[in-house]
Amino acid sequence: MSQVVAQQVESRFRETFASSAALYDRAVKLFPSGVTHDSRYLKPFPIYIDHASGSRKTDRDGNELIDYWMGHGAMLLGHSHPAVVEAVAAQVGRATHPGACHELELEWGERVQRLVPSAERIRFTNSGTEATLMAVRVARIVSGRTKVLKFAGHFHGWHDQLIPAASPPHDAESGYSMPGITEGVFGDLVIVPPNDLEAAAAAIAEHQPACVIHEGNGSRWGAVPARAEFLQGLRQVTAESDTILILDEVITGFRVHEGGFQSVCEIVPDMTTMAKVLAGGLPGGCLAGRADLLEALAFENSLGKKMKHPGTFNANPLSAAAGCAALDVVATGEPSRVANRQAARLRQGLNALFAEQGLPWVAYGDFSAIKLIPGYQGPAPEGDDWVPYEGDYRRLDVTYDESLGHAFRCALLLGGVDWMGWAGSTSSAHTDADIEATLSGFATAIELLCADGLISAA
Ligand code: PMP
């Protein structure tokens, strides 16, 4: 935040979140930039949370905030859901790591199979990143091919193979290669524009990839929304060319619908990666899919080559206990329905607020995601499945002014709302009162940003 502008936001922020400032002084001596995840980086300092319950979290100064991070999407049921807390408490004194098989891993896997019928076989991992890493390697082993086709802007975790082209700029010359990723690894990637079936089909024909990986409902939790027709087309094109289709449902899995995005689109991917909601707010992920593909992980398999898969905490009993408890609630269908409905209400309320204030911002998104575009230039939203800029990914999936981004998050925190960059996710714990309070929080933030000259409303 520059010193000239944002004076009110910054001085009020420092005052309100004073304990966090002190903690951050310690953090910078420990962690690069003082943070343990890139997206938690905030200027002048991030806030430190003490405890969380339902839709709310409370920081070290006792400020209660309505949360739209929801554990990076993992907390579909809200924080500290009683069923999850009880299950974890019951397990923690029994065994957290028996270094052995245990019944809870079966209970967990069977729940996944019941909700996601394409999960003929499952292998648990510790994160979504590990799950997509495993998916790509399995596809290579089974197909005997090397290349991987991914879509520009789609995020699949931070391992070497899939982190390129996960964020803007979407320009092969300046943006796709990445520091630390070797040319060899990068050269194995085929990158095509999102939602472009013709381009995908042509690239498959040209490069004969081992697999095509698609992020659930599109670039970074639907910033460039993908729709059922596209997924159905992609399923057809991959099936016809005998190419493995991996649907990365790390965020959409169990969140958009109890059966995931594949159930919404009525497609059957060859393999699916899941994490987040899967483990009920604890660490955990999985690769699930066709039995003949996951055979690559089996001993003495018919392929004659086995993929090595250790992992100290795979299917650990605490994550399994939390996952089972969460999936039992997810299975009712209610959590997705409520979270989706509350996000739609918020998108609608925000667009009404922006219009009322004459602020050139817009809210959009599918399911339980709310995306914001500051400085939007285009026609007014029409209906909830409306997509700005007619879905043009080069206009939708862009980087917005960073100093405004920091000031906006700080201003919104002063309004009692913790927002994740330019996007937010709801949970089933978000009430109508939360949505109303969030809209007031936005009004406060807009007022502060206007007063500091960072934005102007008509
Ligand atoms: N794939 C998708 C679609 C994701 O949203 C994420 C996490 N945001 C990942 C993979 C990586 O998962 P994790 O952070 O658990 O490694």
Image (cartoon, grey):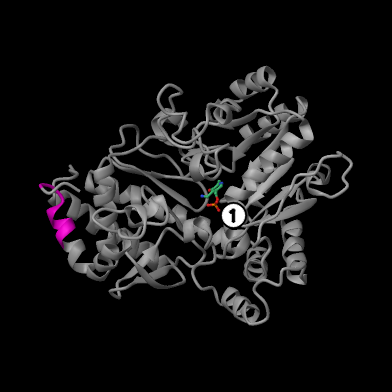
Q: Residue furthest front?
A: 29
Q: Residue at x 76, y 59 (%)?
A: 114
* Residue 367: x %, y % from top left: 52, 50
Q: Kindly identify which residue carries mark 1.
A: 127
- Spot occupied by residue 53 in the image (x, y as percentages of width and height): 45, 73
At x 77%, y 32%, the residue is: 143
In the image, farthest residue toward the left: 4
Q: Quadrant of residue 19?
A: bottom left
Image quarter hosting the C terminus: top left
Three-letter code, disc 1: Ser
Question: In this view of the protein, can residue 269 be seen by the observer?
Answer: no
Depicted 399 relative to depicted 11: above or below: above
416, above or below 233, in the image: below
Check the image and report above or below for 327 versus 38. Answer: below
- Residue 87 vs residue 376, the one in the foreground: 87
Side (left or right) of 155 relative to 242: left
Is 334 within the magenta? Answer: no
On screen, 22 above or below 450?
below
The picture quadrant where one finds residue 139 is top right
Q: Position of residue 270 (x, y in %)?
A: 74, 40
Assign a secondary structure to mark 1. Answer: loop
Q: Nearer the viewer, residue 448 or 29?
A: 29
- Within 8 Å: ligand 1 and the Cβ of disc 1? yes
Q: Would residue 128 be seen by someone viewing this image from the given angle?
A: yes
Range of residues picked out in magenta: 4-11
Q: Residue 11 location in percent, x, y?
A: 15, 60
Q: Left or right of 221: which side holds 290?
A: right
Q: In the image, 258: left or right of 111?
A: left
Q: Is the magenta region chiefly helix, strand or loop? A: helix
Residue at (32% x, 58% y) in the render? 439
